[in-house]
Image (cartoon, rainbow, N blue to C red):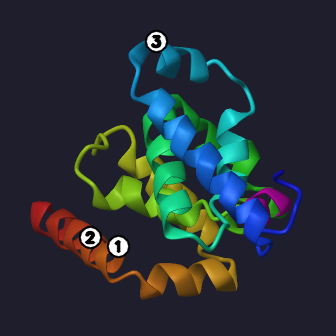
Amino acid sequence: ILDYSSDDPNVKSIKKIIAQNLYDFILHANVLNFMKTVPNLIPMLLQMIDVEEDETQLNTYRCLGKLMNERDIKTMASPNFLQHDQVKVELIKQNALPLLIRCIIETEFDSIRVKPIVLEILLALSFNNDASSALKQNINLMSKIRNLVDNTNSDK
């Protein structure tokens, strides 16, 4: 289903149902623990967020928020991983930017261990014109980064 065009109404509907059901399953601790062991689940969810349907995107991001942990983000931040332009393009293509931005903006993510890694990923992705534009247009992200810079400068 992931290989079919997201413009097809039937595909959109199926993806919407899948995302809703996955999120419903994730609300159960035992199922969530099992889902965390499924090796390709996060990449598949990243493929689903390209659907132009708000509810599908919301439920997909909710699933990713429950499934991704610090280790997953560190894996994404691995220097060998991020140095490859193909990987950067794929992250952008898979629409990972909103999830990464969420890691910076929301307070639930660890400021010491998670946010610096995510900032490194965003820095690496910012050399892509499309990613750079998307990052600059996100007012909340830019405000958060300005606050980080101001706080860092005031600590010196």
Q: Which residue sits furthest top?
A: 30
Q: Which residue sits furthest left?
A: 154
Magenta region includes residue 35: no
Residue positioned 22% across, 50% down in the render? 107
Residue 128 vertical placement versus 73 (above, below): below
Range of magenta residues = 86-90
In screen coordinates, is 99 left or right of 1? left
- Which secondary structure type mostly characterizes the magenta part of the structure? helix
Percent position (x, y) of residue 96?
60, 59
Circle 3: residue type:
Asn
Mark 1 nearby-residue class (10 Å; few <14, some 14–19, many ≥20): some
Disc 1 to disc 3, how far (Cα)?
34 Å
Circle 2: residue type:
Lys
Percent position (x, y) of residue 15?
68, 54
Residue positioned 57% across, 15% down in the render? 34
Percent position (x, y) of residue 9?
74, 71
Q: Earlier in the sequence, mark 2 or mark 3?
A: 3
Q: Which residue is mark 1?
A: 141
Circle 1: residue type:
Leu
Residue 5 vertical placement versus 19 (above, below): below
Q: Secondary structure at mark 1?
A: helix
Work out whether residue 96 can be spotted.
Answer: yes
Disc 2 to disc 3, how far (Cα)?
35 Å
Residue positioned 44% across, 87% down in the render? 137
What number is the disc on residue 144? Answer: 2
Q: Which residue is mark 3?
A: 30
| Label 2 with label 1: CB-CB less than 8 Å | yes
Residue 21 vertical placement versus 122 (above, below): above
Q: Quadrant of residue 42?
A: top right
Q: Secondary structure at mark 2?
A: helix
